[in-house]
Amino acid sequence: MMDPHVLAAFAGVALVLTMAPGLDTAMVLRTSAAESTRNGVMAAFGIGAGCLLWGFAVALGLGALLATAPMAFVALKWAGAIYLVWLGLKLLIKPRGSGGDPLPARAAPEVSQWAAFRRGFTTNILNPKVGVFYITLLPQFLPANATGVAPALLLAGIHVALAVTWFTILAGGAAVVRKILQRPPVARGLDLATGCVFVGFGASLVLASH
């Protein structure tokens, strides 16, 4: 059984890193504002699922492949970069509110909750930085005599629970101000800002060293 003090320390570090604004924050806020609160929450669960899968891979030792197989790391980061740049360019080329017309109050029917979940999941699972995050952080909190995958999975589960909780709160917060965020100038600015974040993170993946 792991020391409760160690678990509390890990939870504190994980919470601070989770709450720091970044790619996941931009995705959840934009999804909730542009589509619906449910879609924002589903994107949060997709992010959590991607993190959990990375945590499971690291617990099994598969994450170490990123450090020992340069080609695997390069292939993964290019796949993630292309996906993020594609998402970002879609928002930059055709942001909402460009025509100045009022925006619908609800998400378009074709934007399903599953699509929002898949978007959050894909963004995280194609991001090798999440794997590096787990490879770097988890061992620092694992006891020296830890055996099996359970301790690492416990830490990963704590991080995922905190992340899903935080991003769900953000999705709900965006819903409160959705009327403001649906105004054409604000919606256009939000899409352009989110697009820049996606493209920027995609570029950072390409430029990141192994």
Image (cartoon, rainbow, N blue to C red):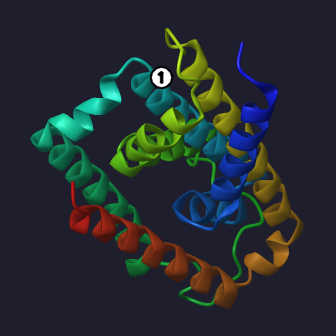
What is the quadrant of the C terminus in the image? bottom left
Q: Position of residue 169 (x, y in %)?
A: 82, 53
Q: Position of residue 100 (x, y in %)?
A: 62, 90
Q: Residues within 10 Å of mark 1 (few under 14, many from 20)?
A: many
What is the quadrant of the N terminus in the image? top right
**183 or 136: which is nearer to us?**
136
Is 202 drawn above or below residue 190 in the view shown?
Answer: above
**121 or 149: which is nearer to us?**
149
Q: Is residue 36 left or right of residue 160?
A: right
Residue at left offset 65%, top offset 80%: 187
Is 64 drawn above or below residue 59 in the view shown?
Answer: below
Residue at left offset 74%, top offset 42%: 9
What type is the residue that disc 1 sits on?
A: Phe
**140 or 97: which is nearer to us?**
140
Residue 175 is drawn in which quadrant?
bottom right
Q: Position of residue 202 (x, y in %)?
A: 33, 65
Residue carrying label 1: 56
Q: Residue furthest right?
A: 176
Is 41 drawn above or below residue 7 in the view shown?
Answer: below
